Image: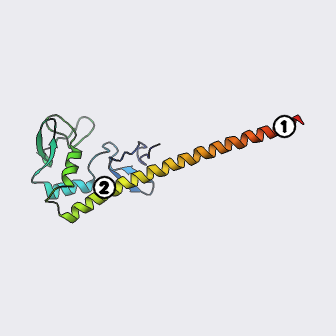
Amino acid sequence: MQVKCSKCSEPIALTDSVEFFESGLAHVDCKRVRTLSPQERALVFVYCGGHQVAHCLPCDQRYRFTELATDILGGGQTNLCPRCRKDLTESVRGHLYSCGLLPLEMRRRAQAVRAAAHQLVKQAQQARDRSDVLVREAEALLFERQQALRQAMSQRAAS
């Protein structure tokens, strides 16, 4: 069983951008689950606005963040290659976490936030898996007890 978003009830993957609420984990944007977080976008604008941040492998082209396309008619995707429409979000994220213009402490904090989000999703998944096992064990025990009770009742009725 997978951890589900508390807003849209869809499964949360390790690569999804998530945030934590009192009600649990949720996608930053349920329509675009792998989108850059608001903090990542801000860092890209502030520190990487003047240079290329994405590389489209199929087109072998590099783009600045402001050159990336947005799908305004379809699914609302952003960070698309202007030529082939491939999603370049992970390329931008990879650049952000390795950009030499981003102050080292800022880069470390961004990586720590991303790692913490991954860890949170993993822990939630493990807790959900464990609870699923416990529920199945309880159901099996309940079934056994019900069978034993029925058997005892039928023996008593037969006596």
Q: Residues within 10 Å of mark 2 (few under 14, many from 20)?
A: some
Q: Which residue is mark 2?
A: 114
Image x and y of residue 104, in percent: 19, 64
Q: Which mark is residue 89?
A: none
Q: Quadrant of residue 43?
A: bottom left
Between discs 1 and 2, the one toward the N terminus: 2
- Residue 97 horizontal side relative to residue 21, left or right: left
Q: Which residue is mark 1?
A: 155
Q: Is residue 56 above or below residue 111?
A: above
**Residue at image coords 52%, 49%:** 130
- Residue 74 horizontal side relative to residue 8, left or right: left
Instruction: Inspect the image, locate mark 2, and give the three-letter code of the amino acid beneath it.
Output: Arg
Of circles 1 and 2, the one toward us is 1
**Residue at image coords 39%, 56%:** 20
- Residue 159 horizontal side relative to residue 106, left or right: right
Q: Quadrant of residue 140?
A: top right
Instruction: Inspect the image, locate mark 1, and give the three-letter code of the amino acid beneath it.
Output: Gln
Image x and y of residue 105, in percent: 22, 65
Q: Residues within 10 Å of mark 1 (few under 14, many from 20)?
A: few
Q: Quadrant of residue 89?
A: top left
Image x and y of residue 139, in percent: 63, 43
